[in-house]
Amino acid sequence: MASAYQRARSPEQKAERTEQILSTAEAMLAEGQVVTSLSLNELARRAGMAKSNVYRYFESREAILLALLEERTKTWAGEAAVELAHIDRRRSVVHRVQTMAAVMARGVGARSVMCHLISVLPSVLEHNVSVEVVRAYKVASLTVMHELAQAMHRALPELALEAHGELLHHAFAFIVGGWPLAHPAPMVVEALQVPELAEFRHDFERDLTRVVTLMAHGMLAGG
C-alpha cells in the first residue's frame, strides 16, 4: 500500500522503483487499457506508492510511457540483433531480405504494448513532457536504431549502413499507422466481415514483412 512506501535512497533502490513503475504501466496496458485513459492515480496505487512519489521519478504519465517504450524497444532490438546474426550470408540476397524482414516483423508483432506505444508516439507520448525528456528519448532511440542497423548491415552488407538506418525509420513510421489499422475497434472488425470489404482487413505482421521487403529491394535497386 502507499502508506508503506519508503523512499528509495541507493541507486539500486531507485532503479528498482523505476522498473516497478514501468512494469505496472506495462501490465495496465497489457490488460487492454488505452494510453489516453491510463490513470496515474491507479498506476501509483498498483505500484504501491502515492502519486506524489511517482512524480519523484517521472514528470508525467507520458514521461513514464516514453521510458517504457525506450526500454522495451531496446530489449526487442537486442533480441532481433541476435536473430539477425544467425542469417547465413552465403544465402541469396532475396532470401536474406525476406528473412530479415520476417525477423523484424515477428519480433515487433509479438510486442503489443510496444506497438501500441509507438502508434501514439507523435500524437500522445510526445506531449505533456519537457524538451529534456523528449531529447533524452530521441538520443536513446538513435543509439538503439544505430545498433540495430549495424546488425542488419552485417546480415545484408549489400545495402549500405545508412540505408539500413533509413529502412528502420520508415518501418517505425509504418507501425504508427499500421498497428491501429490492424487492430481496429470491435464494430469495425464486425463491419469488415463482409467479403466486399476484405481488402480493408490488415494482418500486421504480414503487412510489416511486406513493407520492409519491398523497401529493402527498392533501396538495393537504387530506388
Image (spheres, rainbow, N blue to C red):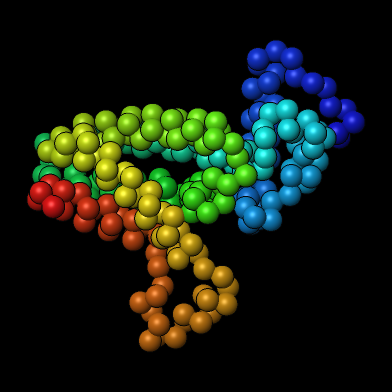
Q: Quadrant of residue 82?
A: top left
Q: State the image quarter where residue 89 is shown.
A: top left
| Residue drawn 65% across the image and 16% down it | 12
Task: Classify residue 106 as left or right of residue 184.
Answer: left
Residue 89 versus residue 14 in the image, above or below = below
Residue drawn at (78%, 30%), measured in percent from left and top? 53
Where is residue 28? Give x, y as percent: 67, 48
Give percent across and percent down for residue 136.
50, 30
Q: Is residue 75 visible?
A: no
Residue 83 appears in the picture as rendered: yes
> Which residue is nearer to you in this view: 160 or 209?
160
Task: Kindly give the residue lying farthest to the right in the view shown.
Answer: 3
Task: State whether residue 192 is above or below residue 37.
Answer: below
Q: Quadrant of the N terminus?
A: top right
Q: Is residue 157 above or below residue 209?
A: above
- 97 left or right, relative to 177: left
- For the residue pair 18 and 130, the one nearer the viewer reads as 130
- Residue at coordinates 65% horizontally, 15% vertically from top-left? 11
